[in-house]
């Protein structure tokens, strides 16, 4: 899985390990990667440093992860975000967000699907966002990339259902992670941004990473064996308004 060294990704890695999976984490944060792999319950876990902006390295990393005993599940949880409107963003900022959030999903799928097709019930799970389904102000690159992930999921699911590969998308709402806190800090008034975000969640609180991980584990499991091309929203009611 990607992005498993912190936040939602780490919670997913921990949940999958608890359920008996041997987890390989691909991440660009060496310190958190080492600590997370050491802390995972069970045996057979590995970590590999990877910059998801490098498509060739991404495909190579998937092939290496699949080599020991095959590949049953791949989760793309890594994400990046840069605040700004279209006139404010540079071309480099736009490309950097799409390269990690969307283009990396394409490279991961291209590399993983042949391996998943050889696994009975192989599953690909792409983590998007509730902001892939609705718009928001000042985050044009992030919302565009996550909207792309949602529709990429649907096309991949149709293309590869005949091979027995299930492809689904999970859309978390605001979740209490360092990623969310950094988004507040970028505004220059973190307290105000936090209060505004909280006010848009009908359940009145932010999600916890473990709650997102529970939904991810379900979509990766045999309990979801008849689910493909789906978008599961776990957002405390955010997009119901």
Image (cartoon, rainbow, N blue to C red):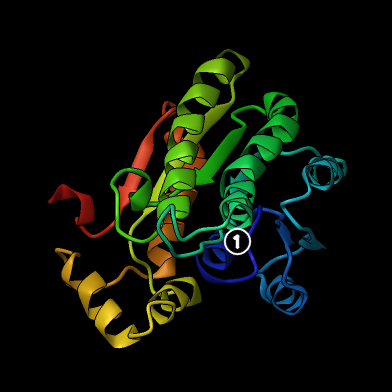
Question: Camera-side residue: 57 or 14?
Answer: 57
* Relative height, residue 145 to residue 212 (above, below): above
Query: What residue appears at the point 79 percent right and 37 percent down from the top-left corner?
Result: 70
User: In this rendering, would 141 be left or right of 3?
Assistant: left
Q: Secondary structure at mark 1?
A: helix
Q: Position of residue 69 (x, y in %)?
A: 82, 41
Viewer-side residue, 8 vs 213 = 8
Q: In the displayed structure, would residue 92 be above or below residue 161?
A: below
Tell me what residue is drawn at x 43 percent, y 28 percent: 229
Q: Nearer the viewer, residue 187 or 211?
A: 187
Q: Residue furthest front?
A: 87
Q: Quadrant of residue 38?
A: bottom right
Report the front residue among 48 and 52.
Answer: 52
Residue 230, image quadrant: top left
Q: Residue at x 42, y 82 (%)?
A: 185
Residue in the picture at 21% in, 56% down: 238
Going by the image, does 120 lie left or right of 118? left
Count neighbours of disc 1 (C-alpha within 10 A) and say few if under 14, some if 14 to 19, many if 20 or more.
Answer: many
Horizontal and vertical percent position of residue 65: 81, 47
Horizontal side of 95 relative to 158 (left or right) equals right
Residue 240: x %, y % from top left: 16, 48
Q: How many marks?
A: 1
Q: Position of residue 210 (x, y in %)?
A: 43, 67
Q: Which residue is under mark 1?
A: 13
């Amino acid at each position: 899985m990607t992005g498993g060294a912190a936040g939602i990704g780490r919670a997913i890695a921990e949940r999958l390990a608890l359920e008996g999976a041997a987890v390989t984490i691909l991440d660009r944060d060496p310190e958190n990667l080492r600590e997370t792999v050491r802390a995972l319950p069970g045996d057979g876990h590995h970590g590999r440093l990877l910059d998801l902006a490098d498509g060739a390295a991404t495909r190579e990393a998937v092939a290496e992860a699949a080599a020991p005993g095959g590949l049953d599940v791949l989760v793309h949880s890594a994400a990046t975000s840069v605040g700004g409107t279209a006139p404010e963003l540079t071309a480099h900022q736009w490309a950097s967000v799409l390269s990690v959030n969307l283009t990396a999903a394409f490279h991961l799928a291209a590399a993983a699907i042949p391996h998943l097709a050889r696994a009975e019930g192989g599953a690909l799970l792409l983590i998007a966002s509730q902001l892939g389904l609705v718009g928001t102000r000042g985050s044009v690159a992030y919302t565009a990339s996550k909207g792309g992930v949602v529709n990429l999921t649907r096309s991949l699911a149709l293309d590869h259902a005949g091979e027995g590969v299930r492809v689904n998308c999970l859309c978390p709402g605001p979740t209490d992670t360092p990623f969310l806190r950094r988004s507040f800090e970028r505004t220059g008034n973190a307290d105000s941004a936090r209060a505004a975000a909280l006010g848009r969640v009908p359940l009145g609180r932010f999600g916890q990473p473990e709650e997102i991980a529970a939904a991810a584990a379900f979509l990766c499991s045999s309990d979801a064996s008849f689910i493909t091309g789906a978008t599961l929203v776990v957002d405390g009611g955010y997009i119901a308004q």
